[in-house]
Amino acid sequence: MKRFRGFLVLTIVFILAVALVTAGCGKKQEEKKEAGDSGKFKVAFMYVGPVGDGGYTYAHDQGRKYLEEKMPDVQATIVESVPDTNAADPERELTRLAEEGNKVIFATSFGYMDPTINVAKKYPNVVFMHCSGFKTAENVGTYFGRMYQARYLTGIVAGKTTKSNLIGYVGAYPIPEVVRGINAFTQGVRSVNPKAKVKVVWTNTWYDPAKEKEAGKTLLDAGCDVIAQHQDTPGPQQAAEEKGKFGIGYNSDMSKFAPKAVLTSAVWNWGPYYYNTVKAVREKTWKSDQYWGPMSDNIVGLAPFGPMVPEDVNKVVDEAKQKITSGQWDVFTGPIKDQSGAVKVPEGQKMSDKDMLSFDWFVEGVDGSIPKK
Amino acid sequence: MTDTGQTNVLVLILATAVTAGTPILYAALGELLTERSGVINLGVEGMMLIGAVSGFMTAVVFKNPWAGVAAALLAGGAVALIHAFLTITLRTNQVVSGLALTIFGTGLSGYLGKSFIGLPLPVPFTSRPLGMLSEIPFFGPVFFNHDPLVYLTYLLVPALWVFIYKMRPGMHLRALGENPSAADSLGVKVFLSRYMYVVAGGMLAGVGGAYLSLAYAPSWLENMTAGRGWIAVALVIFALWNPLRAMVGAYIFGGIDALGLRLQVLGVMIPSFFLQMMPYIFTILVLVVVLGKNRSARTGSPGALGIPFDREER
């Protein structure tokens, strides 16, 4: 009896384990294998989330699809939901991808930084591209986009739309990337509507749909009539939709989640960059580099405007876009004042990349505060 | 700010506390029943996710949110059945099985829901003011201006309280958790009853998850419960296994986030880490207070909680 029970337990545990592997981890092994490996140029993408997150990873995967379309002789493998909170998982997956003969490997989360550097040492003939990090090596490059430029443009749309002159912004964490986005957005709002204010609420989460929606509701109740966000879920947009107000999405076009509310979204457009990088590696012109792509490279941009956005807004946005992409002006060109009214960037001066990457103060017009560490 | 302005903010915070607390309340009531019968199930988070995804998929296909609730009941119960089989029949470690269930539920729900991400819910649950009741000053907007699933808890909580403390099967349930051997000799079918309560617990956890995907957020996103299952487990202890206290606790736990966000808008910053640990601090405080009053009291925790029942090993 005892022995039988032990056997039964083992069987059940085994079945559960198999179910787990197929359901949970199984997705990771989901590879795009074309008929045979017949001479195709192999590249790989490692993602932190599921392709269906409707946000960050989805945007990267759209880039992967673009690459495959433009270069049919490229075979792109993907690995989903690799946690970036430990080193073991990404190192194992990166090693596997390198062993399988991939020539370029894109690691798309900040937390993959050290694992990428470590594995790259063992595979000098493979090019590793790490998204949003700051460590490079002979065969490791980094890449990211100047999302703040797109956010500035969405700020113009919001500033033109608001009636209450109060715009809400749901922020994830008070880190420089998010602060920079809020500041750029506010600059955009105030360029067309100097009376408007941007009210900030922190959720302290990247991914909690219910809480992020609650944050949106809170801002709406406080009198905001446009809700922008730096979050990975469309919760804040849904809150705006329910109240019959407007919103600005992020990561990818969020209009499908809240069609009546989303004016536009600040979106990532990785495709052309992935294409150019793979092309450079194949033509042997690739060199390790730290790329922070401007909007003129189309790596960041705006999703199509919703039907509720008036024609004349289009024109204003296009003019501003022209100014930024031509390189003659950037979002953080002085004079820029902080919340107390003190001039932080003098007239005519451009803020340096280093200062932008360590933003820890809000510009004039932001109603909110950055919690002290 | 005027006086009415402040009352309005208070009403908004409390009304949010009720809706934010409802998914946790459903899950906690389920876990309460399960634990009362002597079985601990730490798979609440997984069962909630399974309930959320199956409820959403069904509601989309049938264009009816109640169909979604039915599916969530079935799916949550089915997942709990795995736990029941492992821990009651096979007498494996309940903690390990529960944790496995959470991992399993998280993975499976993500896999099942893939093609449903970003789909709109044709008919979500929406607020329906309860006639006269919703017009009572203060209490009306706080309690009686919500969706039907919230109102359902107003019936469920007292019903469970009466069942547990005033009815014969409820007495048997308490006996199951306190001393299954004694219950057995009274003629209570220990195995069958424990199966029933574990499955019932899973069903309620499933509805808790479905509340998020059908009423609160209405949409499906992977891992959308974001830790609420664990809050529910803490809530059962906070409530000392009493459904009425669970209701109060759910609203406190649910209200904490709302309070933090609303205070931010008013310009008051409370460190988020502090707010996030509040549910657990409250739980510890309650235990300290209760134990401080009477050291011999077992705080209402079922005596045989976590111990598998074996007729031959009495």
Image (cartoon, grey):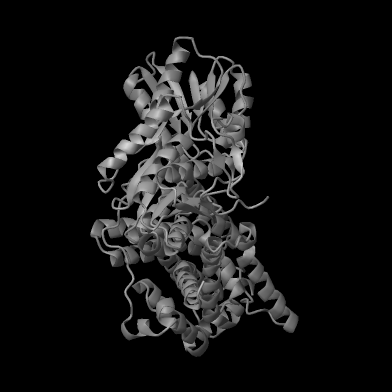
The answer to whether residue B195 of the structure is visible from this angle is no
Give the tally of numbered discs.
Answer: 0
x, y percent for residue B86: 52, 60
Query: Residue A244, image x and y in percent?
Result: 31, 59
Residue A80 higher or lower than B219, as above or below: above
Residue B249 locus on image (x, y percent): 55, 74
User: Residue furthest toward the front?
Assistant: A347
Residue A369, percent from left and from top: 59, 53
- Which residue is pictured at 35% across the width and 53% down the height? A246
Residue B134 vs residue B171, the one in the foreground: B134
Residue B215 visible in the picture: yes
Give the residue displayed 63% in from the left and 79% down from the top: B300
Spot the residue most to the top. Answer: A284
Residue B89 position (above or below residue A355): below
Which residue is at the front of the view, B147 or A303? A303
Is residue A71 depicted above or below A340 in this figure?
above
Please name the residue shown 45% across and 73% down the image. B15
Could you tell me which quadrant the N terminus of chain A lies in?
bottom right
